């Protein structure tokens, strides 16, 4: 079964909504849709801030935005005709690897990005430059990936935002971030690879399993044959997991995310124990790249 086309307007020239009934159909029929990149894969775990997430990444300049989520997650009319909607339960076992690795094999040699709903990509100067410009520069630098830090966002008032999500009153931590050298199974240090920590996963670590405390992801990368994303958000090609090239600093980016705050408030074991996420090092999130660069949460590298 192929894609389902739903007419939004009978007038000639109007856009159509494209919906795939399942992941298998998309992977079998969707190659032509992703012929031109870069492509954003938005993984919908629930209904919270789905439309703002999709709008944000459309505005960044991705050639295609694909939303993966259960069939009962609705999309607003103003974004539904601009994205490809693939019905797939993102709470199923190994959903992350299944979706992203399927897309890797569907469009090799193309730049891909992935994030969840209520997560927002920021990169240096993104208010004035499109994502394609950054990826063109990164390609010219002979780099095939960009390290992204997941920066926790949280509502300033949990009494009014019971799910811990508020775009208008979003806050972030201004300190408490650190890195540890990454080693392999033989305890050998890996070149130019670090494990990064901080944010809510650090401050409320008693509620977060050790393997889920890192805040680094390789969320922007160029697909290649035999490349695979692993459950820990790293790729099976070591050079993709490095924070910089050997000869100078490289661009890094941030994913500003309500996902951890949502989980901590939703979890019965932690939700009632956390009256607020704010502390003395909280600051209102300005929703711009300059604040993130000033805090050292991403850098332009050699891209000026």
Image: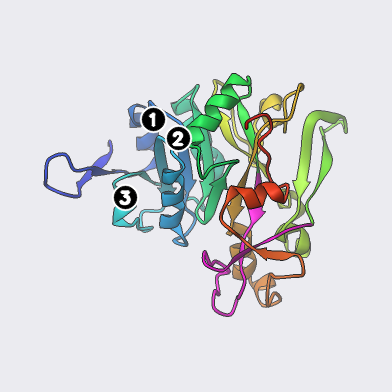
Q: Of helix, strand and loop, which one carries label 3? A: helix
Give the residue furthest to the left: 11
Residue at x-position 67% and y-position 25% = 237
Q: CA distance from mark 3 to mark 2?
A: 16 Å
Q: Nearer the viewer, residue 20 or 135?
A: 135
Asked if the residues shown at circle 2 and circle 1 are in contact, with their CB atoms under 8 angstroms apart, the answer is: yes
First in sequence: mark 3 or mark 2? 2
Location of the C terminus by quadrant is: top right
Asked if the residues shown at circle 1 and circle 3 are in contact, with their CB atoms under 8 angstroms apart, the answer is: no
Q: Is residue 101 magenta?
A: no
What residue would you read off at disc 2? 39
Would residue 260 be seen by someone viewing this image from the given angle? yes
Give the residue furthest to the bottom: 159
Q: Nearer the viewer, residue 137 or 221?
A: 137
First in sequence: mark 1 or mark 3? 1
For the magenta stretch, what is the residue range?
A: 149-175
Image spot of residue 51 (x, y percent): 40, 56
Q: CA distance from mark 2 to mark 1?
A: 7 Å
> Seen in the image, is 48 located left or right of residue 78?
right
- Residue 279's image quarter? bottom right
Residue at x-position 46% and y-position 50% = 56
Q: Is residue 209 above or below residue 170?
A: above
Q: Of helix, strand and loop, which one carries label 1? A: helix
What residue would you read off at disc 3? 80
What residue would you read off at disc 1? 34
Image spot of residue 228 (x, y percent): 59, 30
Around disc 2, counting alpha carbons within 10 Å, would you say few (fewer than 14), some (14 to 19), or many (20 or more)?
Answer: many
């Amino acid at each position: 079964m192929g894609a389902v086309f739903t007419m939004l307007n009978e007038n000639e020239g109007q856009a159509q909504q494209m919906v795939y009934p399942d992941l298998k159909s998309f992977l079998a029929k969707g190659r032509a849709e992703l012929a031109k990149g870069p492509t954003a894969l938005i993984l919908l775990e629930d209904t919270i801030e789905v439309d703002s997430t999709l709008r944000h990444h459309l505005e960044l300049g991705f050639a295609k935005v694909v939303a993966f989520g259960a069939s009962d997650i609705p999309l607003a009319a103003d974004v539904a005709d601009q994205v490809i909607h693939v019905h797939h339960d993102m709470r199923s076992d190994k959903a992350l690897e299944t979706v992203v690795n399927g897309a890797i094999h569907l469009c090799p040699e193309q730049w891909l990005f992935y994030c969840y709903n209520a997560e927002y990509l920021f990169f240096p100067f993104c208010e004035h430059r499109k994502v394609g410009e950054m990826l063109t520069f990164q390609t010219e630098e002979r780099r095939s990936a960009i390290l992204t830090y997941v920066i926790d966002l949280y509502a300033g008032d949990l009494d009014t935002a019971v799910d811990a999500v508020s775009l208008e009153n979003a806050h972030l931590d201004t300190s408490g971030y650190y890195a540890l050298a990454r080693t392999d199974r033989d305890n050998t240090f890996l070149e130019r690879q670090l494990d990064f920590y901080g944010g809510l996963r650090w401050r409320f670590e008693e509620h977060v399993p050790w393997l889920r405390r890192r805040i680094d992801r390789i969320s922007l990368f160029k697909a290649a044959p035999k490349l695979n994303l692993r459950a820990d958000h790293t790729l099976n090609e070591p050079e993709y997991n490095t924070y910089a090239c050997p000869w100078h600093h490289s661009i890094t980016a941030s994913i500003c995310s309500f996902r951890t705050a949502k989980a901590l408030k939703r979890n019965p074991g932690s939700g009632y124990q956390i009256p607020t996420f704010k502390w003395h090092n909280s600051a209102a999130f300005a929703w711009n790249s300059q604040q993130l660069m000033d805090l050292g949460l991403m850098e332009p590298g050699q891209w000026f």
